[in-house]
Amino acid sequence: MTLRVVGAGLGRTGTLSLKLALEKLLGAPCYHMAEVFAHPEHIPAWTTAARGGAVDWEQLMSGYAAAVDWPACSYWPELAASFPDSIILLSTRSASSWWQSATATIFPASLGVPHGDPWRDMLDAMFASRFTTQLNDEAACIAAFERHNARVRAEAPRARVSSSGQRATAGRRSVARSVCPFRTSRFQGQTRARNFSRRTNRGTRPAPGPSPAVRTSLKPSEGVD
């Protein structure tokens, strides 16, 4: 199995909906932050990538047909280069709505992980090298969000890029046509902040990472979208 879709869209741009849709379309697993919870042994590789080290992307992505969400989206150039036949999928939404979602969910959860924990080391290195460490600063985060999207649009080969707004049905249909010839059902509302507690109560999230500190601070309902 080889990676067929590289998700370049940042977390909180409908990445869980994309994960579910792509798994149905491709009939194979899609990498997402949830996979890091399930496979904490992947953390050193992501930390190495954030610090500029060499990563065996084929080994890390073994068994997956697609990758979306953080941390994979931060390394879309490396993944796209390692899998030259893959589609590069940029999921987006308005910067203001993205900020409202991220600051209510994943950013406070990330900042709650104690320093020195491998999870925090991975997140800090990733945000420092590929986003911004100022997760409490709206202007800094929106600037990083827009800078990331602009880089994808400027540097990704146009023939390989497909884009989708979080609520754009037409965009999702174009993604479906790109990766699979048959039709699939819609996946909507999977990433809305108000659904976090519902999903947690139903037990649909994977168990969090290895340390008790992470289990306390980075709840699976807050950290994997």
Image: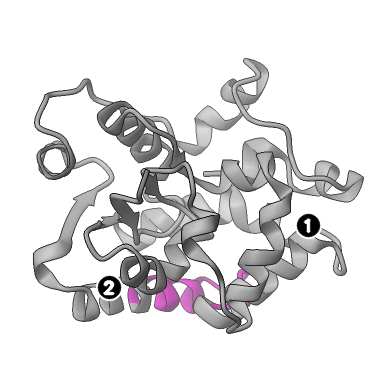
Residue 179 % position (x, y): 18, 42
Residue 30 % position (x, y): 42, 40
Q: Is residue 224 magenta?
A: no
The quarter of the picture where the N terminus appears is top left
Tag 2: amino acid: Val
Hey, which residue is sitting farthest top in the picture? 202
Q: Which residue is under mark 2?
A: 152
Quadrant of residue 136 within the rendered picture: bottom right
Secondary structure of the residue carrying tag 1 is: loop
Give the residue displayed 40% in from the left and 45% down from the top: 15
Residue 126 % position (x, y): 60, 72
Q: Residues within 10 Å of mark 1 (few under 14, many from 20)?
A: some
Q: Is residue 138 magenta?
A: yes
* Image-based side of 78 in relation to 182, left or right: right
Give the residue displayed 16% in from the left and 56% down from the top: 162
Give the residue displayed 56% in from the left and 71% down from the top: 55
* Image-based side of 177 in relation to 209, left or right: left
Quadrant of residue 51 within the rendered picture: bottom right
Q: Looking at the image, is 180 positioned above or below residue 69?
A: above
User: Is residue 156 something one can see in this rendering?
Assistant: yes
Q: Which mark is residue 112?
A: 1
Q: What residue range appears in magenta?
A: 132-146
Q: Residues within 10 Å of mark 2 (few under 14, many from 20)?
A: some
Please state which of residues 103 and 116 is positioned toward the viewer in this rendering. 116
Q: Which mark is residue 122?
A: none
Name which of mark 1 and mark 2 comes first in the sequence.
Answer: 1
Please state which of residues 3 and 146 is positioned toward the viewer in this rendering. 3
